[in-house]
Amino acid sequence: MKKDDIFYSYNRNNETLRHTTLDDAVCEFLESTDLRPETLTVYRFKRVTVPEAEFTHAAEWALESLIENLDEEYGSPEDGGTKITDDMREAANLFGCCIAKLYVPWTCEQDGEETVDLAEWERPT
């Protein structure tokens, strides 16, 4: 899986996108039905872009959760808990940025459509 994956489907509401070429989507349509319309609309989908704020908030939550868990196990019961420092926040932010670069969302959104003239379309070899 890559962030720049493109998928095609003749079904606008398809929840399982697997075709990476328009030809594959057309082939699936032709194999799935005896109907032979003159044209077929094939929809193009791309992966959504996760907002940067999602990673920022998750990294902040992870830092707070980590410090809380560490304090429960190893902290002093008398000092009110570890204060999160700027260095800790910077490290959490770096973590969030790294995950943002590596994370590939499953969710896709429609990115266009193409009308295929089935009489002119040739099955790929």
Image (cartoon, grey):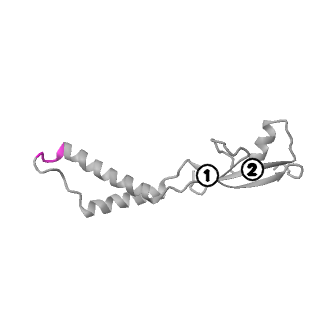
Q: Amino acid at mark 1?
A: Glu
Near mark 2 (Cα within 10 A), the count class, few <14, some 14-19 or many ≥20, is many
Residue closer to the observer: 46 or 24 = 46
Q: Position of residue 42 (x, y in %)?
A: 75, 50
Residue under the image location 23 percent in, 61 percent down: 85
Circle 1 sits in a helix, a strand or a loop, which is it?
strand
Q: Taking 103 as reference, is 21 left or right?
A: right
Q: Are marks 1 and 2 in contact (CB under 8 Å)?
A: no
- Residue 76 percent coordinates (x, y): 13, 47
Magenta span includes 34 = no
Q: Give x and y (percent) for residue 21.
A: 72, 52
Question: Is residue 41 in view?
Answer: yes
Q: Is residue 125 visible?
A: no
Q: Amino acid at mark 2?
A: Val
Residue extending farthest right: 119
Residue at disc 2, secondary structure: strand
Q: Which mark is residue 90?
A: none
* Camera-nearest residue between 7 and 38: 38
Near mark 1 (Cα within 10 A), the count class, few <14, some 14-19 or many ≥20, is few
- Please indicate whether residue 10 sits to the left or right of residue 109 in the image: right
Examine the residues drawn in magenta and state their main secondary structure: loop
Residue located at (86% from left, 41% from top): 36
Residue located beneath label 1 in the image = 109
Q: Mark on residue 42?
A: 2
Q: Which residues are magenta?
A: 73-77
Residue at (81% x, 41% y) in the render: 30
Label count reads 2
How far apart, in angstroms, are the residues tagged by discs 1 and 2?
A: 14 Å
The structure residue drawn at horizontal position 71% and vertical position 51%, both measured from the top left corner, is 43
Residue 70 at x, y = what percent? Answer: 23, 47
